[in-house]
Image (cartoon, rainbow, N blue to C red):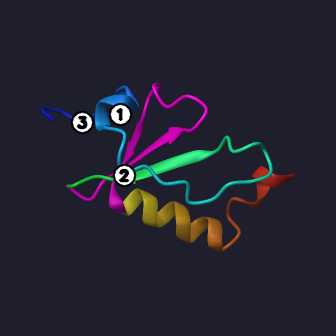
Amino acid sequence: MDRIYNGMPAAELGADGWHKPWSGGNGGNCVEAMKLADGRVAVRQSADPEGPALIYTHGEIAAFIQGAKSGQADFLLT
């Protein structure tokens, strides 16, 4: 792959390697993630696998997960 960029069609990253790190009781529609060869993480909406992929650095994903674990994202649930 020549260039991986934020907003690129997720299908261009391939069909293998996508994982659903969590899934709620919403009929299977959720976020899917793929670890890229360079350590970045691609995220897509499972209901739209051909849609855009958001690309995050390892540091950005680590900060998000650590923040969510510590309650910093709890406002999203209310």
User: Within 10 angstroms of label 3, few (less than 14), some, or many (20 or more) residues?
Assistant: some
Q: Earlier in the sequence, mark 1 or mark 2?
A: 1
State the residue position of label 1. 6
Q: Residue at x 17, y 33 (%)?
A: 3
Question: In which quarter of the view is residue 52 placed?
Answer: top left
Question: With respect to residue 20, does 6 lie above or below?
Answer: above
Q: Nearer the viewer, mark 3 or mark 2?
A: 2
Position in image of residue 8 (x %, y %):
34, 27
State the residue position of label 2. 17
- In the image, what residue type sits under mark 3? Ile
Question: With respect to residue 73, does 49 lie above or below?
Answer: above
Position in image of residue 66 (x %, y %):
54, 71
Magenta stretch, residue numbers: 38-58
Q: Nearer the viewer, mark 1 or mark 2?
A: 2
Quadrant where the N terminus lies? Answer: top left
User: Within 10 angstroms of label 2, few (less than 14), some, or many (20 or more) residues?
Assistant: few
Q: Residue at x 21, y 55 (%)?
A: 37
The stretch drawn in magenta includes residue 44: yes
- In the image, what residue type sits under mark 2? Gly
User: Within 10 angstroms of label 1, few (less than 14), some, or many (20 or more) residues?
Assistant: few
Query: With 3 as the anchor, is 17 left or right in this view?
Result: right
Using the numbered discs, state the Cα–Cα distance from disc 3 to disc 2 in whole angstroms.
15 Å
Using the numbered discs, state the Cα–Cα distance from disc 1 to disc 2 in whole angstroms.
18 Å
The stretch drawn in magenta includes residue 73: no
**What is the count of numbered marks?**
3
- In the image, what residue type sits under mark 1? Asn
Residue sitting farthest toward the right: 78
Q: Nearer the viewer, residue 36 or 55?
A: 36
On residue 14, the disc is: none
Residue sitting farthest toward the bottom: 70
On residue 4, the disc is: 3
